[in-house]
């Protein structure tokens, strides 16, 4: 069946919307493959605006890997802004891909990447615009298989009704495996229709098909059981782990947009996974174990990526980049190599130690030293023991002193508010810390123009972490503590003016909490919010707390549960959690013990440098820690 | 804080004519300038940088066409730290830019000359789908007969009223345009002087609506065909790069300039309404 480009119908609309360039594609390194030559066709979506979605590494990687294969075609689609949505609805233009402007509904698969839960309403909007029935149960053989991936897919239950499938973990290998299953099924003449295809995917054990599982509830609202509803479907679905990052050096040809986007740089993941064991961090728990990319591959990727893109900035990405076993050689090697080329290097630095400053100095060798970021996350030493972010105040002061002494003028400190067991004093301790930072800085430099910015986010308990059982702090308490902190800093004559404070209101975190730890019943809330006009929930100007609360009240009226039940309620050890049948490899008993250790303020080490403490991931997933050093160095380039 | 070495000085300045075609007409000026900066890097063209903590490449633009408008005649100037063959720069820069941003002409700029001074007027082509050519013709006649046509435009500083008539040197219906069988379509060609406040084809269309109630049912497709010095006698726009070509003797025979590309453009890409398809 030939599929026409929608561009001719879209073009007249483009003249009437904001930033039309985001809808026209044509990025450098984007690809348009022949529709009829392809046996399997993927539409990949990042469910946010193009400016946020385009730089997403996950989508770029999968796009490139799929398009490299013969007979496979992948195109991209993003959430359209309300002005465009209105015109598309008026003129009957469906959700389209930006590559060849093909209708999303014409593809075999729609893969959606959820880095955050805040994209759920945008998923519904895209499905609706595409003409794909919202509920998976209403779809026929004509419709694409809708698959979710990304970190939020580790608990896809709130959107389970809208998904045909979800995939946990690294996508590189599994998208190719899924492609093979679809190719075979199509080649055989689509036996058994959509259900058989989903069955083939589900029985592999690596793809979760929500509709093959029934969830039953206890009268009080808790889950009684989640069980497969047909033979051949595994009880638990496991995550995927790519074990040799060097053999997956993507993106090789980064997409370079014409439109302005949030990140204009070539990013290389220098490792995956993190075993520091911060108890609030879902990413650190679900991406274990640590797998480093070698210094040699990193060097080659940076060289190729810059050449292919013309970018002037390189980002070394990971969950804690300073922890790479050869980070010093990488930093020095790249700084040497690109000296004098107006290429800047960036490293999202979060670890609080002096070594990090040395690294940052190396990275800013040719540029300016504006700001350095550290994330102590908790204001008091006690709080940091609870969350297992083992940084002493002395370490922090020593680190910032080094930073100010090496010419940095501004230090940014990240914290969370609303952590389990937190008291008012724990939050006020942030003010003390900031004061000591400024004091140390003034002493080290003899100057008064140094600054410190304190940035605070609300804590949201996440699935597959030791805090998955914790009560989320209610927004009133969070707001009260943050105001007290603000007043405390304002009162300070000596240091107050040198300290900036940035924080968000507590309410949005509650909705994030609802979506993070929700079960299938939350799907009704998401649908109601979307029907009421809810879109772009990651954007404060579009997000409406009142709408979410009102819709939740209506949608959950017949259920024994409400927003509080999902968020501010502590769970006990035996409660069946909505994601218990989804296997991140973490041993449930270990997680519970770590939760108890948190309450007892007992820390846990990093298994990279101490013996394995049996979190369960490696034996369950057949993986192991992969770290250097390799002893290799980055060579200068022969031709720059 | 490290100050770094002083940036290398500009040795050669090049003037570049480029086109914005097909779907790339939706790029804004910022989009274009980012794309050019990256293309210059990928093509290995030695562009000079300004001094300071955030060095900027020395690339300057003159009078860019608005977002959504296609163009065959946009201009920019590059400051290089070394001498390069303009023909090579034309080919390399064109290859490094996405299809639809096409480099047409590159000439060395003699010191002390200003390109902006030569860009006195623009020639525009405006396609109005769904408008009967006869109706458009009468509207244009009424507009040209008027002394003054006050129009309003929403600017960053609020609503502004100004005269759209005086800047229009010529405006007429393009009678060579073939009539489409299914839907009527009128094509206007206009030569508009560069004045302040700028009068753009949009403003002229607002003027046509004002004097003759001409209200096209769909957004106009606008293409800038040329910019340059205006010969008042003939109404023609001269090539603004010609003086540079005459001033600088080509270093190695006729390889010195890279003219000619404008004629080589593939058939069918001269109007905004053609979507560039890529292989
Ligand atoms: C760069 C980055 C950003 C950037 C760029 C975002 C972007 N457009 O990509 C910016 C600054 C904009 C950003 C913003 C936010 N971020 Co952020 N970000 C990151 C960071 C540092 C890297 C992400 C990345 O590129 N990873 C590498 C890629 C390859 O991994 P991936 O996307 O997960 O994709 C792989 C798999 O998940 C899978 N996959 C992905 N999609 C799909 C789809 C299908 C169908 C399949 C089969 C597989 C699949 O395959 C891919 C390859 O293996 C991570 C931390 C980290 N190192 O991961 C945080 C992180 C992802 N961000 C996070 C958060 C919270 C946010 C914000 C919500 C912050 C906020 N409160 O505003 C916003 C949300 C933005 C939005 N609306 O989408 C959290 C996620 C929370 C969690 N799950 O625990 C992280 C993990 C940081 C952290 N430790 O807390 N972020
Ligand atoms: S199983 Fe052991 S080595 Fe592997 S991540 Fe867990 S604690 Fe570390």
Image (cartoon, rainbow, N blue to C red):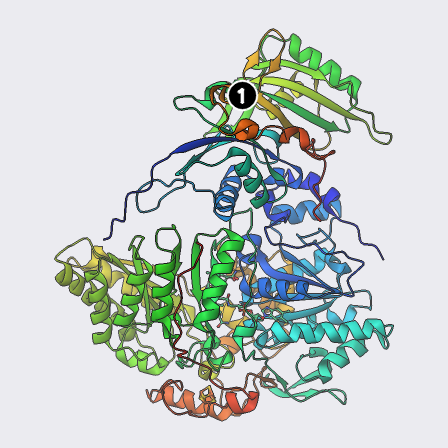
Q: Quadrant of the N terminus of chain A?
A: bottom right
Chain containing mark 1: B
Name the residue at 55% across, 83% down: A584
Q: Residue A27: image x %, image y %?
A: 60, 50
Name the residue at 44% across, 76% down: A281
Above or below: residue A627 compared with residue A296: below
Name the residue at 50% across, 78% down: A287
**Residue A110, picture quadrant:** bottom right
Q: Is residue A375 left or right of residue A32?
A: left
Q: Is residue B255 left or right of residue A386?
A: right
Q: Residue A400: image x %, image y %?
A: 23, 66
Q: Residue B231: image x %, image y %?
A: 58, 11
Give neighbour class at mark 1: few <14, some 14-19, many 20+ (Cα, 10 Å): many
Q: Residue A375: image x %, image y %?
A: 34, 69
Towards the viewer: B267 or A441: B267
Residue A236 visible to the viewer = yes
> On the image, numbered disc 1 is attached to which residue?
B240
């Amino acid at each position: 069946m030939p599929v026409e480009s929608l561009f001719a119908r879209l073009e007249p609309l483009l003249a009437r919307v904001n930033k039309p360039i985001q809808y026209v594609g044509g990025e450098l390194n984007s690809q348009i493959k022949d529709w009829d030559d392809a046996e399997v066709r993927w539409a990949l979506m990042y469910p946010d605006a193009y400016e946020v979605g385009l730089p997403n590494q996950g989508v770029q990687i999968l796009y490139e890997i799929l398009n490299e294969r013969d007979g496979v075609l992948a195109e991209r689609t993003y959430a359209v802004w309300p002005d465009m949505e209105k015109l598309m609805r008026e003129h009957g233009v469906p959700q389209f891909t930006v590559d060849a402007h093909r209708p999303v509904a014409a593809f075999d698969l729609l893969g959606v990447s959820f880095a955050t839960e805040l994209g759920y309403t945008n998923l519904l909007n895209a499905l609706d615009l595409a003409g794909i029935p919202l509920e998976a149960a209403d779809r026929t053989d004509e419709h694409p298989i809708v698959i979710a991936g990304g970190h939020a897919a580790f608990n896809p239950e709130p959107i389970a009704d809208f998904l045909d499938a979800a995939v946990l973990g690294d996508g590189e290998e599994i998208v190719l495996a899924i492609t093979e299953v679809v190719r075979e099924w199509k080649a055989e003449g689509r036996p058994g229709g959509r259900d058989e295809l989903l069955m083939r995917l589900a029985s592999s054990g690596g793809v979760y098909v929500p509709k093959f599982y029934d969830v039953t509830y206890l009268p009080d609202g808790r889950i009684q059981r989640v069980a497969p509803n047909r033979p051949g479907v595994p009880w638990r679905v496991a995550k995927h782990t790519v074990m040799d990052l060097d053999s997956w050096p993507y993106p090789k040809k980064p997409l370079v947009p014409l439109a302005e986007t949030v990140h204009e740089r070539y990013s290389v993941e220098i490792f995956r996974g993190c075993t520091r064991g911060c108890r609030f961090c879902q990413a650190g728990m679900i991406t274990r174990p640590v797998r480093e990319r070698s210094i040699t591959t990193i060097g080659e990727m940076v060289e190729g990526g810059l050449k292919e893109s013309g970018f002037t900035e390189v980002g070394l990405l990971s969950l804690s980049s300073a922890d790479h076993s050869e980070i010093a050689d990488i930093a020095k090697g790249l700084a040497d190599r690109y000296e004098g080329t107006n290429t800047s290097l960036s490293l999202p630095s979060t670890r609080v130690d002096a070594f990090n400053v040395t690294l940052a100095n190396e990275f800013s060798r040719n540029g300016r030293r504006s700001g350095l970021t550290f994330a102590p996350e908790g204001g008091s030493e006690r709080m940091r023991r609870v969350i297992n972010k083992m940084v002493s105040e002395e370490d922090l002061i020593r680190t910032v002193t080094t930073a100010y002494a090496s010419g940095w003028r501004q230090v940014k400190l990240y914290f969370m508010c609303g952590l389990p067991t937190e008291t008012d004093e724990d939050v006020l301790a942030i003010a003390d810390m900031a004061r000591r930072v400024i004091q140390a800085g003034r002493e080290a430099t003899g100057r008064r123009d140094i600054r410190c910015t304190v940035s605070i986010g609300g804590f949201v308990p996440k699935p597959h972490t030791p805090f998955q059982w914790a009560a989320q702090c209610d927004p009133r308490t969070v707001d009260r503590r943050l105001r007290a902190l603000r007043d405390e800093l304002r009162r300070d004559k000596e240091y107050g003016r040198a300290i900036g404070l940035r924080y968000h209101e507590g309410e949005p975190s509650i909705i994030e909490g609802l979506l993070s730890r929700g079960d299938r019943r939350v799907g009704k809330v998401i649908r109601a919010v979307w029907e009421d006009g809810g879109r772009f929930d990651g954007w404060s100007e579009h997000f409406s707390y009142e709408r979410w609360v009102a819709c939740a009240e209506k949608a959950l009226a017949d259920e024994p549960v409400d927003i509080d039940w999902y968020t501010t309620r502590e769970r006990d050890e035996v409660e069946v959690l909505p994601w218990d049948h989804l296997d991140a490899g973490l041993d449930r008993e270990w997680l519970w013990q770590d939760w108890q250790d948190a309450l007892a303020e007992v820390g846990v080490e990093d298994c990279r440098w101490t013996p394995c403490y049996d979190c369960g991931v490696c034996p369950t997933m057949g993986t192991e820690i992969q770290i250097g050093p390799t002893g290799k160095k980055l060579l200068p380039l022969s031709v720059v | 804080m490290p100050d770094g070495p002083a940036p290398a000085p500009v040795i050669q300045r090049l003037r570049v004519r480029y086109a914005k075609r097909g779907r790339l007409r939706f790029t804004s000026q910022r989009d274009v300038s980012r794309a050019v900066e990256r293309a210059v890097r990928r093509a290995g063209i030695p562009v000079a940088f300004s001094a300071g903590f955030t060095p900027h490449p020395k690339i300057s633009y003159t009078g860019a066409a608005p977002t959504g408008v296609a163009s065959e005649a946009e201009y920019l100037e590059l400051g290089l730290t070394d001498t390069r063959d303009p023909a090579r720069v034309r080919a390399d820069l064109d290859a490094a830019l996405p299809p639809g941003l096409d480099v047409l002409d590159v000439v060395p700029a003699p010191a002390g000359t200003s390109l902006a001074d030569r860009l006195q007027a623009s020639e525009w082509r405006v396609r109005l789908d769904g408008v009967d050519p006869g109706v458009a013709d009468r509207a244009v006649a009424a507009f040209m007969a008027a002394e003054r046509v006050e129009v309003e435009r929403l600017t960053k500083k609020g609503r502004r009223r100004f005269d759209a008539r005086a800047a229009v040197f010529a405006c007429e219906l393009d009678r060579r345009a073939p009539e489409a069988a299914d839907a009527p379509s009128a094509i206007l060609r206009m030569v508009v002087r560069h004045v302040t406040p700028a009068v753009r084809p949009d403003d002229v269309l607002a003027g046509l609506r004002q004097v003759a109630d001409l209200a096209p049912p769909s957004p106009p497709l606008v293409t800038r065909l040329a910019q340059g010095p205006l010969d008042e006698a003939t109404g023609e726009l001269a090539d603004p790069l010609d003086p540079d070509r005459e001033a600088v003797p080509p270093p190695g025979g006729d390889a010195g300039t890279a003219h000619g590309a404008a004629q080589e453009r593939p058939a069918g890409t001269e109007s905004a309404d053609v979507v560039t398809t890529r292989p």
